[in-house]
Image: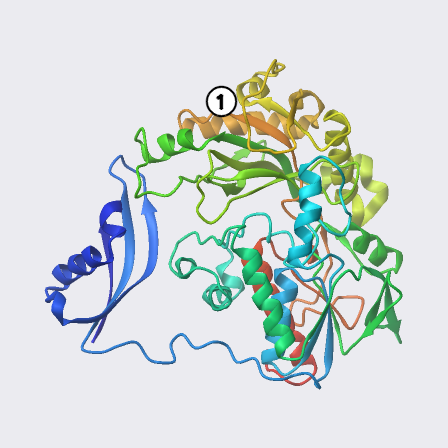
Amino acid sequence: MIHQINITVSPETASNIEECKEYSARKLNIQVKDITHFDIVRRSIDARSRNVKVNLGVRVFVGEFPAENEYDLFNYSDIANKAEIIIVGAGPAGLFAGLRFIELGLKPVIIERGKDVSARKSDIAAIHRNERVDPDSNYGFGEGGAGTFSDGKLYTRSKKRGDVSRILQIFHNHGAQPEILIDAHPHIGTNVLPKVIKKMRQTILDAGGEIHFQERVSGFIIENGAMKGVETHQGNSFAGKAVVLATGHSARDIYFMLNDAGILLEAKNFAAGVRVEHPQGLIDQIQYHRPDRGKYLPAATYRFVQQVQNHGVYSFCMCPGGVIVPASTAEGEMVVNGMSPSHRGGKFANSGIVTEVHIDELKQFEEWGGLAGLKFQEELERMSFNMAGDSYMAPAQRLVDFIEEKPSASLPSSSYHPGLTPSDLHRWLPDFISARLREGFKHFNQKARGFVTNEAIVVGVESRTSSPIRIPRDQDTFEHLSMPGLFPCGEGSGYAGGIVSSAIDGERCAEKVAAKLGLFDA
């Protein structure tokens, strides 16, 4: 017999599997010796009161064991001689599309402008040394996409998109820690994810797929009104049965190429703001209602949302025990992001705090049509770069000073490695962003007393939370509305956001392509 039950225990008990088993046995009124197998299938922390508890979903097997094939790997058969599908981008959407194509009997040919995950590291190190930004190899571009070196959080609220557990299992099968299968907010970590990405690449190559690095798309192959493939800056051409566009939302040159080719684009609402950083110990005190979280609780997180002037102001990509990183993808722009290692043991906590930007607020960019939001992003990032003294140091201000609209004479220590420079963000950020952020911070402090403090800093700018453009596709077939053969997916398409939703979108896109070819019933 298999019992699946929920138990609520102390953090100390939750960390000891034998104590959890004994607690479950008492709840089921059975003997511990009768339990033949025990596992935890779900875990979350309830910190609403001072007595912090851990909620566990557990399976208790009595007289039997899990099925032998319960954790079987996915079946990736040899597709070396099968029909080829061109995938542009080796981020989560592209990689998961590639893996799904293999399952469906098609050969993925992945074209990636950046370098493999190992070679990316030296280019990222150069940004941290305030030296240069390689426009094809940075935090945004390269094998694994933006998530590889910027955290690897796997939480999504978009559960209606597809099977989240399937995505998590694929990550686990490629070396991610088993905790991602049970945690309410799973996280791989920047120190682990590169190894996982390498194994995913090897799975694709072992099955007969192809991955071509340092091949930036420079043009499209269009025949008889349909997209057949792409050309690259290296002078190579890649053609197939369809083109899956999975470039991520920072590949601005792709949007310009699509626009120049007369391929329909739509401007969409997006978000922009700052990254805020606190001492992690302060966030622990606020969230756990105790002076010290102790050894059994993880670094505390938070999630805030507030309506201000009919626009959402919210936290995004919260990184407990993490660091702020320079996420620029071109020279002359200043963009920040956050990341955490798997242990989340750093001294600081950071999060994007952003506000919705509606397209009708960007009147000065109307002439750019579907590219209006992109041009606004560019201008904001160049302004941030200029405010940092034309360097990859980041403009920053103490949080209270930002709210009270006064300069910061000095700045506290920070995790941001290139360094910070004091700057009046409240003055040079667009008024509609600055005003809404200030009001949002005040509301957040009401929910979490102590959040607004001059121990915290705001750092500019956080502008890559989502795509300002949608590449419109058919709701049922995922094919582009005006360009047959083109299948946009992932964050760059404007239909997904984050690692998991992009991975799901990539898988669904693969299924739609296979359905068009008569190989799958989507």
Q: Where is residue 446 in the image (x, y as percent from the top left)?
A: 42, 27
| Residue 122 appears in the rendering | yes
Q: Which of 431 and 245 is in front in this view?
A: 245
Identify whether 425 is placed above or below 193.
Answer: above
Residue shown at the point (13%, 71%) measured from the top left:
34
Q: Is residue 368 left or right of residue 338?
A: right
Identify whether 304 is placed above or below 40.
Answer: above
Few, some or many C-alpha atoms within 10 Å of disc 1 (few <14, some 14-19, many ≥20)? some
Q: In this view, does 258 lie to the left or right of 387?
A: right
Q: In this view, does 331 lie to the left or right of 106?
A: right
Residue shown at the point (21%, 57%) measured from the top left:
20
Instruction: Indicate the amino acid at tag 1.
Output: Glu
Q: Where is residue 478 in the image (x, y as percent from the top left)?
A: 68, 68
Residue shown at the point (54%, 59%) measured from the top left:
500
Give the quadrant of the N terminus. Answer: bottom left
Q: Residue 161's image quarter?
A: bottom right
Residue identified by numbered label 1:
455
